[in-house]
């Protein structure tokens, strides 16, 4: 048991770093994912993850596989897409799903083009799927910083983020915070995706954001506990994924996301608000 | 005038350069209880959005000189009923004007929320999830939030829609209670009997203001007929409204008559409070 569960993390430095990185990532990304899901923007997370690609690729093209330029590039690209799509949906007739789709498609095509200009398909694989088993100190520091920023910002703006999800018109009638909060939130999404792509790549970093959140929805009917449960599920997925990766020599990113996927599927069935409890079990009803 | 809660100066609100509220002038007295009446598309909800500031005027202004705190219950709430939260949390949002983003919710605040729920007859609903409420229960929850907001000016847009007779009665009592507390209340309503029975003042809209003042006079047969003649559709190529058009306009002119301006008896200011 010890050999299977604990030893890999004790004996190998790269496993410790992978564990630390993915745990820190869960701490910030999972609560953000909960709000993304509750705002019906789950697929927006996916789109944003693609949107980061050209920035990261441009950093890669200019400086090679280096964390700082790739991160800054990703942040800039993500910010342009988030602000561009958000602004178009706020100031024109177009809804955010369409403007977001337009922006991310442009962005993705640009990203693939940039990578193909210089890199090989191996490089593209790195950017797309990440390398959690090769996290540098810089990357760890960056992820820790991003998690800390995310948690602090969420704590400060909690009421506004909840109000903006629950009743945006009400928030607009009592405060000017509505539009800024939307963009602050999108900023957190970008930040966490950029943090995630070091470890999991742009394609899978959104998985750690959305899957634990989607799974947590089946366990509670309150948003605060939902965030906490999402973090726990995120952490469990990371540990399980890394162990699978270590023992079965699987790629770590997909292993983590598939673990989260398994927890999601189990939650849909066995969660307190899952299929079993809401559809199958309750044949009896109470008196009126 | 010290007791003016809101002042409209030539207020024009609308969409895509077509006015939905056209050249509204007048004053809403502090402590008045006004029904806003008119057909669909006559500008009632638009006026409320203009007062709250969600919609910016195309011309003129709406001045809240006294800095009255506004509570607004929209007709088409953007409320997400599937959001995982409890009745009590939704009502607690009403503390926002007082506590803002970071202010601590005190014990008194919590008591206030609980007593607001009690006042709307939802005692024991504190921990219920929003998606388990009936339409009327949700409406009462939103009234409880308005109660908690403790606002000087309360705007309710068709609050009696899809609400049963008993709940309408309860909500009317709340509105009267606010009126008795000298809060200013404006309510969009379609039920004319209800308006005539409970609302001392009425504003009749047909995109143009038709009449405003004592309910019986404002909703006279003559005025109702005039309001009914308004054309609900926009004319895409309607001529541009020039400023002098409405300055020289007079009663009897159907399309641009600003009858709120005309007979003294219909002016809200001239009424005995």
Image (cartoon, grey):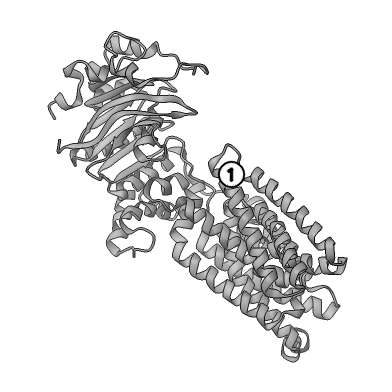
Q: Is residue B17 above or below residue B101?
A: above
Q: Residue furthest bottom?
A: A11
Q: Is residue B46 above or below residue B192?
A: below
**Nearer to the camera, B126 or A178:** A178
Give the percent coordinates (x, y) of residue A274.
65, 56
Report whether residue B172 is seen: no
Report whether residue B240 is seen: yes
| A190 displayed left or right of A112 | left
Q: Secondary structure at mark 1?
A: helix
Query: Which quadrant holds the C terminus of chain B?
Result: top left
**Nearer to the camera, A100 or B243:** B243
Give the percent coordinates (x, y) of residue A38.
57, 53
Residue A231 occupies quadrant: bottom right
**Nearer to the camera, B231 or B62:** B62
Residue at 61% from the left image edge and 39% from the top image edge: A94
Q: Residue furthest left?
A: B272
Give the percent coordinates (x, y) of residue B250.
27, 12
Residue B167 occupies quadrant: top left
Residue at 32% from the left image edge and 26% from the top image edge: B36
Residue at which label 1 appears:
A88
Residue at 70% from the left image edge and 74% from the top image edge: A67
Q: Is residue B139 above or below residue A134?
A: above
How many numbered markers are drawn?
Answer: 1
């Amino acid at each position: 048991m010890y050999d299977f569960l604990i030893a890999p993390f004790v004996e190998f430095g790269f496993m410790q770093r992978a564990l630390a990185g993915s745990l820190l990532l869960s701490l910030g990304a999972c609560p953000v994912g909960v709000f993304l899901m509750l705002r019906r923007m789950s697929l927006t997370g996916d789109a944003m993850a693609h949107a980061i690609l050209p920035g990261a690729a441009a950093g890669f093209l200019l400086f090679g596989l280096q964390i700082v330029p790739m991160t800054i590039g990703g942040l800039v690209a993500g910010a342009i897409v988030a602000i561009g799509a958000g602004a178009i949906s706020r100031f024109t007739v177009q809804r955010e799903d369409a403007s977001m789709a337009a922006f991310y498609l442009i962005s993705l095509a640009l990203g693939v083009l940039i990578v193909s200009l210089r890199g090989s398909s191996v490089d593209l694989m790195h950017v797309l799927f990440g390398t959690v088993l090769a996290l540098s100190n810089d990357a760890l520091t960056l992820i820790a910083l991003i998690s800390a920023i995310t948690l602090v910002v969420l704590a400060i703006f909690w009421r506004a983020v909840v109000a903006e999800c629950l009743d945006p018109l009400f928030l607009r009638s009592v405060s000017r915070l509505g539009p800024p909060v939307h963009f602050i939130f999108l900023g957190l999404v970008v930040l966490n995706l950029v943090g995630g792509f070091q470890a999991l790549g742009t394609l899978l970093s959104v998985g750690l954001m959305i899957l634990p959140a989607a799974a947590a929805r089946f366990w509670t009917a309150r948003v605060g506990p939902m965030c906490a449960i999402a973090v726990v599920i995120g952490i469990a997925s990371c540990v399980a994924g890394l162990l699978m990766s270590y023992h079965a020599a699987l790629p770590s990113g997909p292993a983590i996301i598939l673990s989260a996927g398994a927890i999601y599927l189990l939650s849909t069935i066995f969660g307190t608000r899952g299929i079993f409890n809401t559809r199958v079990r309750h044949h009896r009803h109470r008196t009126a | 005038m010290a007791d003016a809660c809101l002042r409209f100066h030539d207020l024009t609100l609308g969409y895509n350069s077509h006015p939905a509220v056209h050249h509204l002038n007048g004053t809403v007295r502090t402590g008045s209880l006004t029904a806003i009446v008119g057909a669909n598309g006559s500008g009632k909800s638009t006026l409320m959005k203009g007062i709250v500031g969600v919609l910016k005027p195309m011309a003129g202004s709406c001045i809240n000189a006294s800095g009255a705190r506004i509570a607004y219950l929209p007709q088409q709430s953007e409320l997400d009923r599937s959001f995982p939260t409890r009745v009590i949390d939704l009502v607690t949002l009403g503390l926002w004007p007082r506590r803002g983003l970071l202010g601590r919710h005190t014990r008194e605040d919590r008591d206030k929320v609980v007593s607001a729920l009690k006042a709307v007859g939802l005692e024991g609903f504190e921990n219920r999830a929003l998606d388990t409420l009936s339409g009327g229960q949700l409406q009462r929850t939103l009234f409880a939030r308005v109660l908690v907001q403790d606002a000087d000016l309360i705007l309710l847009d068709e609050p009696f829609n899809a609400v049963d007779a008993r709940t309408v009665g309860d909500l009317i009592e709340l509105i009267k209670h606010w009126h008795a507390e000298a809060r200013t209340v404006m309510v969009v309503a379609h039920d004319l009997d209800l308006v005539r029975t409970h609302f001392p003042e009425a504003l009749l809209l047909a995109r143009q203001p038709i009449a405003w003042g004592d309910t019986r006079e404002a909703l006279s047969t003559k005025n109702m007929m005039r309001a009914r003649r308004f054309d609900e559709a926009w004319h895409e190529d309607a001529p541009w409204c020039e400023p002098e058009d409405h300055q020289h306009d007079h009663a009897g002119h159907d399309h641009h008559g600003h009858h709120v301006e005309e007979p003294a008896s219909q002016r809200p200011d001239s009424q005995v409070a």
